[in-house]
Image (cartoon, rainbow, N blue to C red):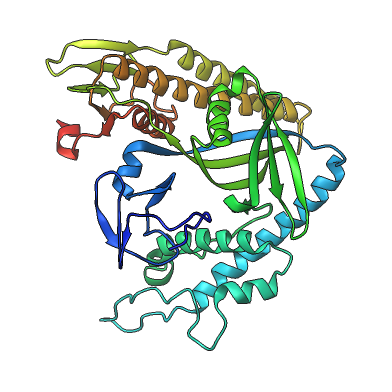
Amino acid sequence: MADSAGGSVPTDVTGEKIRCGKCGKEAKNPGSRLPHGWKRKGDEPRCDECWNKEHVLRAIVIPVVSPGENVTWKELNDALQEMFRTTTRASNWIITELAKRETRPVGQDAKLGPMPPVDDPKPAPSLYMRAREVFPSLPPQSMSSLIQSIVRKYRAKRREVVWRCSESLPNYRYPQPLPVHNQSWTPSLVEDRPIVSVRVTQDKRFELRLKGGARYRRQLAAFRGMCTGEAQYGELALYQAGSDLMCKMVAWIPRRAEKKLEGVLYVRTAPESLLVAFNAKDEKLWIWNADHVKRWAAEHAQHLQRWSEDQKAEQRPVPEFAERRAAAAKKYHHRMHTAADQAAAYLANYAARRRFAVVEYNDSDKSYFEKFVWYRLKERLAIALDERGITFSEPSAAKKTA
């Protein structure tokens, strides 16, 4: 069997079985590809369980500073704008084609059947081949990635759209990100500056210089791992965020060395503090008050109120301070997100230093600051704990209300 990366036939394949090089788990040999969820570490395959214990999937986002040599911003922007238009049109075309295949249930006793296959039955061409005919300028691997992501989104929304009719078909607006397959881009370091070589159009590649410095030290550490082979990189995406061109790279990053972990750290929100942590004896171990966050919110609310009063003084439809108000709102949202990220990092570092095995998080009491970005705090905390090998859990509904 040939490895998907072009390697030789591994010694762990016998007949129709393939064996994990770490735990010995066997699975059916699918031929030239590894089973679903399996990865290859060097010459040895890893099952999904062993791989997830050794690696963590993360997205690294770094802004683009400039294109490479002999390429101007205009040439890069022209190519990207054309690709953004194509991916937007292709995304709406693909999801419409998926909806056209559906047979809507009729009658009181009707049931929602299984999702129709993505590939048309023979001899009709597959959805991929039809999409390639309609959008020939999109690189083939980018088209394949686009179809897979849209099929996942449609499958998640299918019941609400087809059966309950509670939602409309998802609509993609310009500019949609350009997905780039892992075989169509390569990372490199030139004088310790991150650079990616990306296939943007069918026949042209661009070198993109990414931002560096202390602000992106976490992203650069993962990027160096991708360059050395320590981290296994996957798909890249280019997208527009305001006036900035962003480069998003997905990679499997090795987990930190495991320590002996034990015990549960109980984290709660409280009326007088943003986060409070207790041990099993209900002893208070750690507190983060975050008084400055409430101060930011009060100042921002006061500014919005005063701007609202000034706008009523016949400054319509666009007041002279519209840009300052928009900039203040953007700064406030960035502050809230940064505060949530910091709280998650502080708590995860404390749990790792004290070697807790589980963190039970309960945010049912939001009276301290109801308008805080609680969803982002919980999301970032789960990610930070997972990177440190600590289990994130939430109490049951009955325990939350107790």
Q: Residue at x 20, y 34 (%)?
A: 395
Report the label total. Answer: 0
- Which corner quadrant holds the N terminus? bottom left
Q: Residue at x 79, y 28 (%)?
A: 320
- Which corner quadrant holds the C terminus? top left
Up-down: is 257 above or below 165? above
Residue 120 spot, x, y in % from top left: 50, 81
Q: Nearer the viewer, residue 324 or 286?
A: 286
Residue 180 spot, x, y in % from top left: 62, 52
Q: Residue furthest bottom?
A: 123
Up-down: is 243 above or below 266? below
Up-down: is 226 above or below 274? below
Q: Nearer the viewer, residue 112 or 49?
A: 49
Q: Residue furthest left?
A: 281
Instruction: Give the image quarter of residue 202.
Output: bottom right
Up-down: is 156 above or below 22? below
Residue 141 spot, x, y in % from top left: 61, 60
Q: Residue at x 39, y 55 (%)?
A: 10
Horizontal side, residue 72 vs residue 302: left or right? right
